[in-house]
Image (cartoon, grey):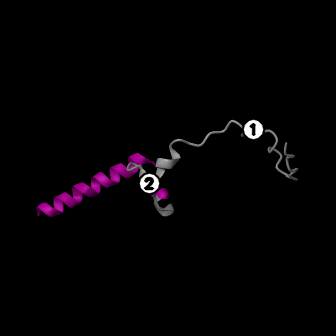
């Protein structure tokens, strides 16, 4: 039988949160393999607040590029 070390912790919620039944996130190991996930730079987050705005801008860019290659 081992004694548990007493830790002097000033976290007020430390004793209220029970992690004894926690499990690892099953999706975390595949996080870097997700091809649908793109990370935007912080300055672009202000311009593109959601996925739809990014998609709309990219569609316009693709249309413009396609029109220029036809000329």
Residue at (44%, 54%) from the top-left corner? 48
Residue under numbered circle 1: 18
* Residue numbers of the magenta segment: 45-71
**Dot label at residue 48:** 2
Q: Nearer the viewer, residue 36 or 26?
A: 26
Q: Is residue 3 left or right of residue 36?
A: right
Secondary structure of the residue carrying tag 2 is loop
Neighbour class for label 2 at 10 Å: few (<14), some, many (≥20)? some
Q: In the image, what residue occupies the spot 80% across and 45% down?
A: 14
In the current view of this chain or complex, which residue is farthest to the left? Answer: 71
Q: If the image is split into quadrants, where does the N terminus sit?
A: top right
Left or right of 20, for residue 38:
left
Residue 60 in the image, given as x and y percentages of width and height = 28, 54
Looking at marks 1 and 2 on the same chain, the residue that comes earlier in the sequence is marked by 1
User: What residue is at 49 percent from the left and 57 percent from the top?
Assistant: 46
Viewer-proximal residue among 58 and 10: 10
Q: Main secondary structure of the magenta part?
A: helix
Locate residue 20, reporting x and y percent: 72, 38
Q: Residue 19, percent across and down? A: 72, 40
Which quadrant does the C terminus fall into?
A: bottom left
Q: Given contact means CB atoms under 8 Å apart, are the residues at marks 1 and 2 in contact?
A: no
Q: Is residue 49 left or right of residue 52?
A: right
**Few, some or many C-alpha atoms within 10 Å of disc 1 (few <14, some 14-19, many ≥20)?**
few
């Amino acid at each position: 039988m081992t004694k548990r070390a007493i830790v002097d912790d000033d976290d007020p919620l430390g004793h209220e949160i029970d992690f004894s039944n926690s499990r690892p996130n099953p999706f975390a190991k595949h996080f870097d393999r997700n091809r649908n996930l793109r990370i935007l730079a912080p300055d672009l987050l202000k311009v593109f607040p959601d996925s739809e705005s990014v998609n709309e801008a990219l569609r316009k860019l693709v249309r413009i590029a396609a029109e220029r290659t036809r000329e």
